[in-house]
C-alpha cells in the first residue's frame, strides 16, 4: 500500500458518500459516529461475517474478511466474502466478491458501487477480469447478481475521486434537510435543519455586504 496512507479512501466511505456527502465527511473527516438500532444490527451481522477464514463449497474456495486495496485508485478496505471460482480453462481461479447487507434492497447505487470497488481492487491484485459479484440481503435472504459494466465502473471511479476530494478539503459540507435524514443515525450530530439555516444566513449576509459595497 502507499506510504501516504491517510489519503486513501475506505471502501465503506463510498456507501456513506452516495447516501449523503455530509454524512461521509462527518464520519471520515471529523471521525464522528453514533450508533442506532439499524447500525448496531448491521455491526453485529458483520462481526459474524468478518471473522477471517476459508472453506470450500461445491468446488468453490470461499475466503471471508478479505483485505483489499488498489494502488491506482488509492482505495482499500475489506470484502465480506470472496468466492474463488474455476475459470474457463479450469487451471486458475477467478474472484467473485459477495457483500452482505443487513436489510432489503435499496433504491440508488450505493451498494453496487461499493461492490464494484471491491471488484476493481481484486482485478488489480490478481491481474484478472472480475465481471460479476453479488449482494446478499439478510432480510430477503437472497442474492442479487451484479454485472460490473462500463457505466457502473465509471460511476464507481467517479465516487472514489469525489471521496478523495472530500478528504482533501477536510471540511464538512452543508446540506439541506431531506427525507433521508430521518433514517440517518448521525442526524442528532449533523443537525441539517440548523446548519443549513446557518449557511443560508451566511450567504444572505455575504450577498448583502457585496451589494452594500
Image: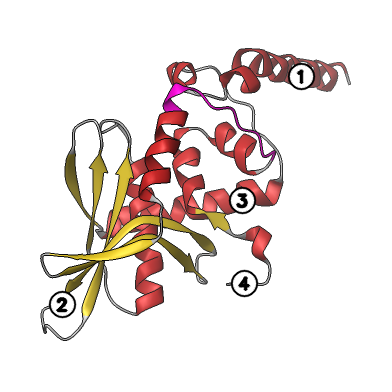
Q: Compare marks 3 and 2 and give the one earlier in the sequence.
A: 2
The residue most toward the right is 213
Write the residue at 29% across / 77% down: 128
Residue 150 in which image quadrant: bottom left
Q: What residue span does the magenta drawing correspond to?
A: 30-39
Looking at the picture, tell me which residue is in the foreground, 125 or 59: 59
Tell me the number on the disc at residue 190: none
Q: Are marks 4 and 3 in contact (CB under 8 Å)?
A: no
Q: Position of residue 125 (x, y in %)?
A: 40, 75
Q: Compare marks 4 and 1 and give the one earlier in the sequence.
A: 4
Write the residue at 44% across / 42% down: 15
Taking the magenta stretch, the answer to whether it contains residue 180 is: no
Which residue has dot 2 on it?
A: 87
Which residue has dot 3 on it?
A: 165
Q: Compare marks 4 and 3 and give the one earlier in the sequence.
A: 4
Quadrant of the rendering where the N terminus is positioned: bottom right
Q: Are marks 1 and 2 in contact (CB under 8 Å)?
A: no
* Real-space Cα separation, disc 3 to disc 2, in angstroms: 37 Å
Which residue has dot 4 on it?
A: 2
Amino acid at each position: 500500500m502507499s506510504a501516504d496512507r491517510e489519503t486513501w479512501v475506505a471502501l465503506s466511505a463510498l456507501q456513506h458518500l452516495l447516501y449523503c456527502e455530509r454524512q461521509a465527511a462527518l464520519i471520515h473527516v471529523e471521525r464522528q459516529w453514533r450508533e442506532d438500532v439499524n447500525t448496531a444490527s448491521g455491526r453485529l451481522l458483520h462481526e459474524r461475517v468478518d471473522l477471517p477464514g476459508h472453506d470450500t463449497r461445491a468446488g468453490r474456495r470461499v475466503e471471508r474478511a478479505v483485505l483489499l486495496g488498489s494502488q491506482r485508485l488509492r482505495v482499500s478496505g475489506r470484502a465480506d466474502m470472496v468466492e474463488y471460482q474455476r475459470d474457463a480453462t479450469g487451471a486458475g481461479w477467478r474472484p467473485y466478491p459477495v457483500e452482505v447487507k443487513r436489510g432489503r434492497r435499496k433504491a440508488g447505487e450505493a451498494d453496487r458501487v461499493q461492490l464494484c470497488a471491491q471488484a476493481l481492487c481484486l482485478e488489480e491484485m490478481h491481474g484478472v477480469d472480475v465481471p460479476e459479484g453479488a449482494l446478499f440481503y439478510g432480510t430477503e435472504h437472497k442474492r442479487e447478481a451484479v454485472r460490473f459494466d462500463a457505466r457502473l465502473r465509471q460511476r464507481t471511479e467517479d465516487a472514489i475521486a469525489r471521496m478523495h476530494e472530500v478528504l482533501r478539503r477536510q471540511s464538512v459540507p452543508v446540506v439541506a434537510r431531506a427525507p433521508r435524514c430521518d433514517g440517518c443515525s448521525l442526524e442528532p450530530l449533523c443537525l441539517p435543519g440548523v446548519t443549513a439555516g446557518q449557511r443560508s444566513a451566511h450567504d444572505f449576509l455575504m450577498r448583502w455586504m457585496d451589494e452594500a459595497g
